[in-house]
Image (cartoon, rainbow, N blue to C red):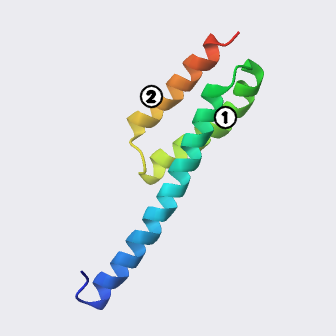
Amino acid sequence: MANNASAEKANRQGERRRMHNRYYARTTRNAIRDIRNTTDKETAEKNAPQVYAMIDKLAKIGVIHKNKAANLKSGIQVYINKLS
């Protein structure tokens, strides 16, 4: 529990950041799931750059680790390459 004004402000800021990070992480997960559930290679290739940008942004702001971002992008590309 916050005992002074600066601790209360830090709690408010932390909650706001948490909700912001949660929103973008959830949106990115949904986009990744949409690509992995598609069976059309053309659609997947068209949507991949936007999803890569979302993943890179999450890594840049520290929501996910940069290696996790690389693994996600690699996995998406492997999936797209397997589509016929």
- Quadrant of residue 36 in the image? top right
Tell me the crowding category of disc 2: few under 14, some 14 to 19, or many 20 or more residues within 10 angstroms, Cα based: few
| Quadrant position of the N terminus in the picture | bottom left
> Taking 56 as reference, is 11 left or right?
left
For the point 76% across and 26% down, the residue is 43
Q: Position of residue 47 (x, y in %)?
A: 71, 33
| Quadrant position of the C terminus in the picture | top right
> Taking 29 as reference, is 17 left or right?
left
Q: Secondary structure at mark 2?
A: helix
Count how many numbered circles sit on residues in the image: 2
Q: Which residue is mark 2?
A: 71
Q: Specify the label residue 49 is tagged with.
A: 1
Q: Nearer the viewer, residue 57 or 37?
A: 37
For the point 41% across and 35% down, the residue is 68
Three-letter amino acid code at the position of disc 1: Pro
Q: Position of residue 79 (x, y in %)?
A: 58, 18
Three-letter amino acid code at the position of disc 2: Asn
Tell me the crowding category of disc 1: few under 14, some 14 to 19, or many 20 or more residues within 10 angstroms, Cα based: few
For the point 48% across and 57% down, the residue is 21
- Quadrant of residue 10 in the image? bottom left
Q: Earlier in the sequence, mark 1 or mark 2?
A: 1
Residue furthest to the front in view is 37
- Quadrant of residue 34 in the image? top right
For the point 53% across and 42% down, the residue is 56
Q: Nearer the viewer, residue 62 or 75?
A: 75
Q: Position of residue 46 (x, y in %)?
A: 74, 30
Above or below 1: residue 40: above
**Spatial separation of the CA atoms under disc 1 and disc 2:** 15 Å
Q: Specify the label residue 32 is tagged with.
A: none
Q: Position of residue 31 (x, y in %)?
A: 62, 39
Q: Secondary structure at mark 1?
A: helix
